[in-house]
Amino acid sequence: MGNGSALLLDESGYALLSPHELSEFLHPKLAVISVAIADKSGLPSPEIIQALQGYNLLRTDQNGWIQITTDGN
């Protein structure tokens, strides 16, 4: 099992391209979904949101711009 610091989900949280098994494997401290406000495609996928319950989750449609910095460790 991994220990990722942050996970940026592909394609605005589209379930087929952002499988929930990835978050289960990596156990990120933070998950980020970049998605437009009122996305007409219904993204992020409900399956992805459910799979990320219990993780710290930031979404650009709800939180605006997201900037992540690290100390490199």
Image (cartoon, rainbow, N blue to C red):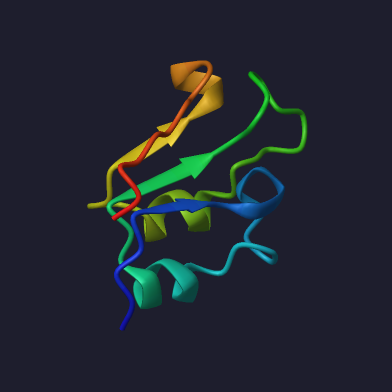
The picture places residue 41, in percent across and down from the top left corner, at 76, 37
Residue farthest to the front? 72
Residue farthest to the left? 54
The picture places residue 60, in percent across and down from the top left corner, at 54, 25
Q: Nearer the viewer, residue 38 or 67?
A: 67
Residue farthest to the right? 40
Residue farthest to the bottom? 1
Quadrant location of the C terminus in the rendered image = bottom left
* Horizontal side, residue 29 vs residue 57: left or right: left
Q: Who's the residue at 44% across and 49% down the image? A: 49
Q: Who's the residue at 54% across and 40% down the image? A: 33
* Horizontal side, residue 73 vs residue 15: left or right: left
Q: Nearer the viewer, residue 45 or 64?
A: 64
* Horizontal side, residue 58 vs residue 19: left or right: left
Give the quadrant of residue 50.
bottom left
Vertical placement of residue 23 versus 47, above or below = below
* Horizontal side, residue 71 vs residue 8: left or right: left
Quadrant location of the N terminus in the rendered image = bottom left
Q: How many marks?
A: 0
Vertical placement of residue 21 versus 62, above or below = below
The picture places residue 59, in percent across and down from the top left corner, at 48, 31
Q: Nearer the viewer, residue 57 or 15?
A: 57
